[in-house]
Amino acid sequence: MGSLRDSSAIGVFVQPGAMQFARACGAILTISFFNESRKPYMSAFIDMRINHCTDETKWTHHSCSPHSLHSQPRRTFLPCFQPGRQPRVGDAVIINESDLPGKISRVLDGEGKALYEVEVDHGRELDRATLEVKEFRVAARSLTSQWKNRTIKIDDIVPMVQPKVLKQSLSPSKNSLFSSASARTARPKPLSKIGLVVTLSTNVDDPDAMRNGLQQSIKSNGGVLLDDWSCVLPITAKRTAKRWIITQNDFKYKPMEGMDKVFLLSDDANQKAKYLVALALGIPCLEMSWLNSLNEEEGLDAWQTYLLPAGLSEHLNARVSQIVDLDWGTCKEHLSEVLTNPVATKLLTGKSVLLLGTEYFPPSTGRRRSVKQGSSGPDNGNMDSVPRIILAMGAARVEVVADAKSALDTKLTSYDYVIVKDESSPVYTNAKADVTCVPMQWVKDCLISGRLLPLTQR
């Protein structure tokens, strides 16, 4: 159980002693119910005056907004919606039986029982299912994005007595349009509406051949091949002759038609720009053998077993795991709100960063350059690749210059971090005590380690 704070939503397990402890603290809770295999099948935001409850079993039924509901026919924990807080047209949901994401298109009246028509968009095909509320669930990220005006206040809660056990009945979905449509239409390609960025480590003997093979496999399976993160995360700030200043307002997600989730594929963890951007944003980086499993029964849904490590942390002397949402891709907000992904560590949130060196701001060749950056190109070869990493790590402002004389603050004291290529840089070796100058390798190691590491002693 996490730390409890007054008037705050926290996650707790329903276990002996938990309710008494929470009741004593007077907290507002997020309750998760588990089945025998310890898999969560219902969670609900419970804004409750805890001293109204005296029996732990009474926490299983309350008027609440669903956090995540998994159908378990042998159990009876179901949300009871207050008027105005029910699922609505346009809500993103996940069908329990098939694990397919969909969207509520209509609310129906099924003889006093609310039924919901859910559309599943396969790209070229559109299936519909008529479901009860117990037959779909709401992803946590969809809840925080779409249900903000349906959360419950303390004074709205009235504890309910222990309900009668619900009788099992034939699910309307058994004869739904979804089932019949699925039977008569061709199965969509496994990577339909999935975007994939490919990067390879230096261990690959023939990277061109491997990259071509991966690209062909992605396309043949219906996937969307992204050359670079700039396709969906362009940097739009203008570059002047002396410097390039970028803020979070210049770094926005750009929707791509026919794509609602994204992954990175690689043969192994590496420190190239594509991989580091994915780590910084909490986008899962998968071993490329995942493509070979797509025709298996649960290949697409079992991507978690193909997670690569974040990389080797030099400071920890260990291969560190990625920090990702294991429900990634179950709702469109994972991608559309990727820059505010709460799972990502965002180690540079709110920081002002100066990138200093000709590696980050190459001198002009005399030819006119485009003032807008973000064009795709070879991995790690764009001048916007390192600024994109720093922005993905949450920096509020990134200033890029070739030398200290071109910086807006030539004393360098106003920047939270001054980043140079390596420790051989004169700016690093001559930095004064009031200047936080770090090599880029320190930034990479922090990102891989998932924490800000001690500064290297100069």
Image (cartoon, rainbow, N blue to C red):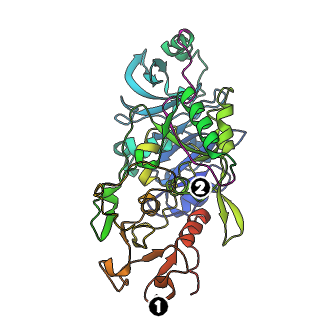
In the picture of the structure, the residue carrying the numbered disc 2 is 323
- Residue 151 visible from this viewpoint: no
Main SS, magenta residues: loop
> Which range of residues does the magenta coloring cover?
184-203
Is there CB contact under 8 Å for labels 2 and 1? no
- Residue 348: horizontal and vertical position, in percent? 46, 68
- Label 2 vs label 1, nearer the camera: 1
Which of the image's four quarters has the C terminus? bottom right
Task: Identify residue type, mark 1.
Answer: Ala
Compared across the picture, whether 158 is left or right of 57 comes to left
| SS class, disc 1 | loop
Q: Is residue 273 above or below residue 433?
A: above
Disc 2 marks a residue whose amino acid type is Ile
User: Which residue appears at 70% of the width and 48% of the height?
Assistant: 205
Residue 216: image location, x then y, percent = 58, 31
* Residue 304, quarter of picture: top right
Q: CA distance from mark 2 to mark 1?
A: 34 Å
Look at the image and tell me whether residue 107 can be seen: yes
Where 14 sits versus 438, above or below? above
- Is 79 a magenta residue? no
Query: Which residue has dot 1 on it?
Result: 433
How dense is the environment of label 2, judged by Cα within 10 Å: few (below 14), some, or many (20 and up)?
many
Q: In the displayed structure, does residue 284 sit left or right of residue 109?
A: right
Q: How many marks?
A: 2
For the residue carrying disc 1, how many other residues have a C-alpha within 10 Å: few (<14), some (14-19), or many (20+)? few
Residue 41 sits in quarter = top right
Can residue 185 be found in the magenta stretch?
yes
Q: In the image, what residue occupies the spot 48% across and 12% down?
A: 177
- Mark 2 lies on a secondary structure that is loop
